[in-house]
């Protein structure tokens, strides 16, 4: 896809506008095509349809539910990217507009999961191999905000060349291996495997120096994917170890803003989110991606140990 998509985006002049409050050397990236997430979205769909065809003939459409949900978030991101490209400024949809759209998508997905019997209010606790039973209304509220939070955390992580994609590859591998380990999750394994393959292909174009950015089209799709997989496996708390990088990135932003307000102008980090702090500490983008992806992989290994005994094989 990239061989054709990248030149087409250049022809459309779909260049990324660089945030004014980011590192100054990022200005050199201005004009790099955005919305490149379309290429791995298309690749994932193709793999889900081809490899998952036999499962769909048996009436198992789990991978398409995940794709459809993630695609809704990708569409929200596409609207955001399109606004930026048309108006040539790094401002798309307002925060309120994105929040309302994302919350509506989350509620719709959770309702579908409940209807299909893929979701229970029994909150699985990794490492303890037990459940905490909570009421459906409380669980639905909890789940909706976890999904929206996860989506935006992945979006925040997409700040330097190859970062969001590289961090998400181990997450996809974790869910693919879980599907291989447990029975009944074959279609989810197809989706997780397609996610890994799509991202590795995308990194050929997105690794530093990036020829294309995934844009909000790609990062919101990835956020929707990660959140949806966690709930489809009915273990949302696994997002804590597998999403440790996303969490640290988001918390650095929250802590920076809170500390700035409390101290009337002082900063906890040189710049937030966290990857910009390390950039200003002298880390190259390649080193940053390698370290953050390694931390993500470690979190996924810990997560695997925490759910190993969930089902008997």
Image: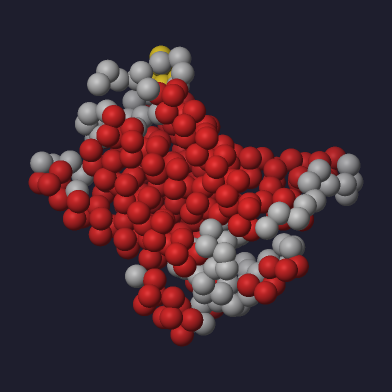
Foreground pick, 266 / 83: 266
Q: Is residue 31 visible?
A: yes
Residue 251 sits in which quadrant? top right
Give coordinates of residue 122: x percent, y percent. Answer: 38, 20
- Position of the N terminus, as image quadrant, is bottom left
Q: x%, y% of residue 81?
A: 52, 68
Examine the rendering and report whether any part of residue 142 can be seen.
no
Q: In the rendering, at what x and y percent does residue 129 appear?
A: 40, 16
Q: Is residue 154 above or below residue 244?
A: below
Q: Where is residue 160 drawn, in percent x and y?
A: 61, 59
Q: Which quadrant holds the C terminus?
A: top left
Q: Residue at the location (37% across, 22% down)?
A: 308
In the rendered view, would you say 105 is above or below 308? below
Q: Looking at the image, which residue is at 42% across and 62% down?
A: 202
Q: Nearer the viewer, residue 180 or 186?
A: 180
Query: Which residue is drawn at the image coordinates 37% and 38% (left, top)?
Result: 175
Relative placement, left or right, of 29 versus 261 is left
Using the rendered view, name the quadrant where residue 59 is placed: top left
Give the residue at x 39% y 71%.
Answer: 2
- Judge left or right: residue 119 versus residue 133: left
Colouring of the image: secondary structure
> Is residue 266 depicted above or below 119 in this figure?
below
- Could you tell me how many numbered marks the image carries? 0
Task: Give the residue furthest to the left.
Answer: 57
């Amino acid at each position: 896809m990239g061989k054709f998509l990248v030149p087409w985006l250049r022809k459309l002049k779909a260049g990324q506008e660089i945030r004014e409050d980011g590192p100054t050397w990022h200005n050199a990236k201005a004009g790099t095509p955005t919305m490149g997430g379309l290429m791995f979205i298309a690749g994932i769909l193709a793999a889900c349809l081809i490899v998952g065809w036999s499962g769909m003939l048996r009436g198992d459409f789990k991978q398409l539910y995940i794709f459809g949900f993630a695609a809704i978030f990708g569409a929200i991101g596409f609207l955001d990217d399109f606004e930026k490209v048309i108006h040539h400024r790094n401002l798309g949809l307002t925060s309120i507009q994105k929040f309302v759209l994302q919350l509506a998508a989350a509620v719709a997905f959770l309702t579908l999961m409940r209807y299909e019997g893929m979701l229970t209010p029994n909150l699985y606790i990794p490492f303890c191999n037990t459940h905490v039973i909570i009421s459906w209304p409380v669980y639905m509220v909890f789940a909706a905000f976890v999904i929206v939070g996860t989506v935006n955390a992945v979006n925040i992580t997409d700040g330097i060349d190859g970062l969001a994609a590289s961090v998400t590859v181990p997450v996809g591998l974790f869910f693919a291996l879980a599907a291989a380990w447990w029975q009944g999750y074959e279609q989810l394994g197809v989706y997780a495997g397609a996610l890994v393959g799509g991202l590795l292909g995308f990194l050929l174009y997105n690794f530093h120096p990036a020829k294309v950015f995934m844009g909000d089209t790609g990062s919101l799709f990835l956020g929707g994917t990660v959140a949806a997989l966690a709930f489809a496996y009915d273990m949302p708390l696994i997002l804590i170890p597998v999403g440790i990088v996303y969490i640290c990135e988001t918390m650095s932003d929250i802590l920076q803003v809170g500390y700035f307000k409390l101290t009337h102008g002082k900063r906890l980090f040189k710049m937030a989110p966290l990857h910009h702090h390390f950039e200003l500490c002298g880390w190259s983008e390649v080193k940053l991606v390698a370290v953050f992806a390694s931390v993500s992989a470690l979190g996924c290994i810990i997560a695997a140990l925490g759910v190993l005994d969930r089902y008997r094989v």
